[in-house]
């Protein structure tokens, strides 16, 4: 799997022609996305360049401390981003942060312990980044769904509490649905991978000149790692966040 | 006294929903009446701690509610909400869920009969019941816990006259067959007259009158 290619700034600049095309379509069909496309393009250049240099520094320093610092920062920003998508869940930040940290640590710990990857920055940084990114999306979707479910089902939840059920028992059907919706997108994309789309890692490796069988094997490892991590993240996020809808006396909080 | 309220107040945002309520609700059949927005349902929810007041004390059988385990309290003082809200599944699975929570053995047939439903309803999917049947299934589910007090929030508001009369007959029969107290919220004074012997009349979150039925409603 030892492959490397050089990509020039000129090649990147040339790819901006496709961004211009996207902006032109937006302008032509009046979808009013030109400004967003411009912001997205500038942000992608700045953010990816910055992270590229940061990763270069971490690779050169070759210390796990910097890997942990980088992944912690990613988990922090991931939790802040996911919180904005889970507005109906009170106090969503901590469940999200804990979910991302647990999903990242467990997944990376397992892939290292099973001897799949070496515990070096070259493996942990890119895999950790993918894991945390996917875990963020899954936990944000799960909590968004949880917030909607609880808001729409207050009478059912209160009716169950009125029987002397605990908050955990009353919330269980809604937590289950939220957990499912957080995980199902990746399960579905795993089902169709290779048929309807080529996943990013495989594409990147093929472009970099790797053997297709190597590219496929690495992609499979990453897909399975991601499946595990999104399940863990959605489980932890929903398992912690549902509590914030209830008081100590097992009452459904009035959030209005 | 079954329930005692001392200086109970509750706000929702800027609105004062209950304002320094002081009253006592005796065992037997009591009605809480008043116009919409007078705080009837809110008060009912305080009686089994689905909510707590901002200030004041609610007591049950002489002990402040906060001294009870809220889960055990709710199994003894069971609230049937205004709108049916059953769990997915059959009527029997709902009854079993409630009975298991209360640590009671389930006699589904008896619970269904007490609530005015034929035993054949046990296997019915709750999603396929009419609103009236769901309301009765809610009542049967509450009875599966063998509570000492039933709190009923507008139990017939969503029903036609014939179904309302049938549920009222069921409640009268329940009182006769079981040693159980009822606290009924209703906006319908005539229903209160038919079902209760004691009434608390609320207006704007305050006690307008309370006492024996005719005295409180006159």
Image (tube, rainbow, N blue to C red):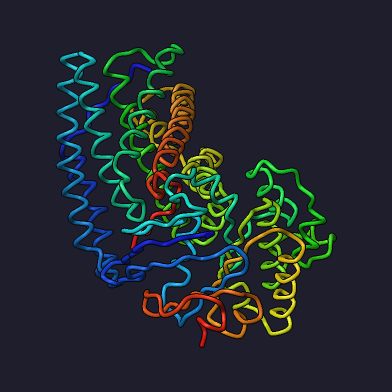
In the rendered image, the residue lying farthest to the bottom is: B218
Image height check: is B32 above or below B2? below
Question: Where on the picture, by quarter, is residue A210?
Answer: top left
Front-most of B92 and A105?
A: B92
Residue at 18%, 47% (x, y): give it. A43
Residue at 51%, 78% (x, y): give it. B33
Query: Where residue B20 appears, x then y in whole percent?
Result: 33, 68
Query: Where residue B212 appears, x then y in whole percent?
Result: 55, 77
Using the rendered image of the protein, determine whether residue A196 is visible from the camera's viewpoint.
Answer: no
Question: Where on the picture, by quarter, is residue B84?
Answer: bottom right
**Residue A24 located left or right of residue B61:** left
Query: Where residue B157 appears, x then y in whole percent?
Result: 59, 78
Image height check: is B206 above or below A10? below
Residue at 30%, 46% (x, y): give it. A91
Front-most of A60 and B164?
A: B164
Image height check: is B216 above or below A108? below
Query: Where residue B89 appears, x then y in whole percent?
Result: 70, 54
**Residue A88 located left or right of residue B86:** left
């Amino acid at each position: 799997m030892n492959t490397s290619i050089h990509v020039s700034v000129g090649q990147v600049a040339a790819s901006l022609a496709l961004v211009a095309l996207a902006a032109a379509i937006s302008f032509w069909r009046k979808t009013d996305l030109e400004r967003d496309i411009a912001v997205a393009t500038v942000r992608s250049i700045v953010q990816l360049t910055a992270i590229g240099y940061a990763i270069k520094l971490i690779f050169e320093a070759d210390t796990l401390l910097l890997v942990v610092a980088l992944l912690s920062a990613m988990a922090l920003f991931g939790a802040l981003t996911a919180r904005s998508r889970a507005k109906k869940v009170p106090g969503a930040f901590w469940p999200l942060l804990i979910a991302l940290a647990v999903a990242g640590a467990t997944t990376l710990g397992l892939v290292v312990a099973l001897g799949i990857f070496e515990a070096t920055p070259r493996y942990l940084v890119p895999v950790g980044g993918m894991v945390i990114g996917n875990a963020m999306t899954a936990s944000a979707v799960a909590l968004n769904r949880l917030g909607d479910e609880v808001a729409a089902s207050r009478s059912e939840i209160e009716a169950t509490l009125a029987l002397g059920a605990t908050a955990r028992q009353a919330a269980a059907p809604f937590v289950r649905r939220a957990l499912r919706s957080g995980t199902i997108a990746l399960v579905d994309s795993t089902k169709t991978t290779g048929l309807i789309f080529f996943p990013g890692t495989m594409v990147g490796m093929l472009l970099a000149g790797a053997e297709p069988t190597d590219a496929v094997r690495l992609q499979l490892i990453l897909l399975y790692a991601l499946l595990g991590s999104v399940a863990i993240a959605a489980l932890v996020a929903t398992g912690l966040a549902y509590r914030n809808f209830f008081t100590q006396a097992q009452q459904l909080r009035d959030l209005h | 006294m079954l329930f005692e309220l001392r200086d109970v107040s509750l706000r929702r945002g800027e609105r004062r929903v209950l304002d320094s309520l002081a009253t006592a609700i005796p065992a037997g059949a009591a009605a809480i009446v008043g116009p919409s927005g007078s705080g009837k349902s809110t008060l009912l929810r305080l009686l089994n701690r689905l909510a707590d007041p901002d200030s004041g004390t609610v007591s049950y059988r002489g002990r402040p509610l906060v001294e009870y385990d809220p889960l055990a309290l709710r199994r003894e003082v069971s609230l049937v909400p205004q709108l049916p809200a059953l769990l997915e599944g059959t009527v029997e699975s709902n009854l079993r869920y409630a009975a298991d929570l209360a640590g009671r053995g389930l006699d589904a047939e008896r619970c269904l009969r007490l609530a005015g439903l034929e035993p054949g309803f046990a296997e019915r999917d709750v999603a396929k019941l009419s609103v009236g049947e769901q309301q009765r299934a809610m009542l049967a589910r509450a009875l599966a816990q063998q509570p000492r007090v039933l709190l009923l929030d507008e139990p017939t508001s969503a029903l036609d006259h014939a179904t309302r009369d049938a549920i009222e007959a069921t409640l009268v029969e329940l009182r006769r067959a079981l040693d159980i107290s009822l606290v009924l919220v209703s906006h319908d004074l005539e229903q209160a007259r038919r079902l209760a012997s004691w009434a608390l009349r609320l207006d704007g979150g305050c006690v307008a009158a309370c006492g024996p039925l005719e005295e409180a409603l006159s």
